[in-house]
Image (cartoon, rainbow, N blue to C red):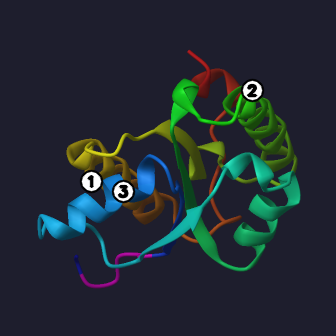
């Protein structure tokens, strides 16, 4: 990492049945990803309310990746409810002047080590470009939803 380059914290909410085993496989394979990454094992990310994400940004978390099972979630309707919740969070982020690219919902399976590393590196590059939360020029919603 270049001197003076911003390296904010990346929070990963990893579902215990899919994404967390994928993250574990990355570690077991001795593959590397940015050290500013914090992985939180969760049963189902749908349990986190909208304000959780905003509170994270207020407390200095620069980027959040929600790594879920996607439509293969073991809890019926949970992924669809989570996607709707994240859409509401995007609106709240825009109201606060936060770039919505700081929050990403993605599906990671138990053996998706390349996808895991790619997601983390992409978020790390993004937050390095944007700087601390709240100091960026947010991307318009239309550029995110193509």
Q: Is residue 137 above or below residue 27?
A: above
In this rendered view, identify the residue nearer to me: 136 or 87: 87
Kindly indicate whether the residue at mark 1 contacts the one at mark 3 (C-beta within 8 angstroms): no
Residue 64 screen position, x and y as percent? 57, 58
The residue singled out by tag 2 in the image is 77
Predominant SS along the magenta part: loop
- Which quarter shows the C terminus? top right
Is 138 on the left or on the right of 52, as rendered? left
> Which residue: 26% across, 84% down?
3
In this rendered view, identify the residue nearer to me: 137 or 122: 122
Question: Quick one: label 1, few (<14), some, or many (20+) residues within 10 Å?
Answer: some
Residue 56 screen position, x and y as percent? 72, 70
Tell me, yes or no, if residue 32 can be seen here.
no
Image quadrant assignment for residue 55: bottom right
In this rendered view, identify the residue nearer to me: 82 or 142: 82
Whole-number angstrom distance, CA of label 1 to CA of label 2: 27 Å
Magenta residue check for 22:
no
The residue singled out by tag 3 in the image is 21
Element type where label 1 sits in the image:
helix
Question: Quick one: label 2, few (<14), some, or many (20+) residues within 10 Å?
Answer: few
> Which residue: 52% across, 27% down?
72
Element type where label 3 sits in the image:
helix
The residue singled out by tag 1 in the image is 117
Is 88 on the left or on the right of 9, as rendered? right
Residue 36 screen position, x and y as percent? 40, 77
Q: Which residues are magenta?
A: 3-7
């Amino acid at each position: 990492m270049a001197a003076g380059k911003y390296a904010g914290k990346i929070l990963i909410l990893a579902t215990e049945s899919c994404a967390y085993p994928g993250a574990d496989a990355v570690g077991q394979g001795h593959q590397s990803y940015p050290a500013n990454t914090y992985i939180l094992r969760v049963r189902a990310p749908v349990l986190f309310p909208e304000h959780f994400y905003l509170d994270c940004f207020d407390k200095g978390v620069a980027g959040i990746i929600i790594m879920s099972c996607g439509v293969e979630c073991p809890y019926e309707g949970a992924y669809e409810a989570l996607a709707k919740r994240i859409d509401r969070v995007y609106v709240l982020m825009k109201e606060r002047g936060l770039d919505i690219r700081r929050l990403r919902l993605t599906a990671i399976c138990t053996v998706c080590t390349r996808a895991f590393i790619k997601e983390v590196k992409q978020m790390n590059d993004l937050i390095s470009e944007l700087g601390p939360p709240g100091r960026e020029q947010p991307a318009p919603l239309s550029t995110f939803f193509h």
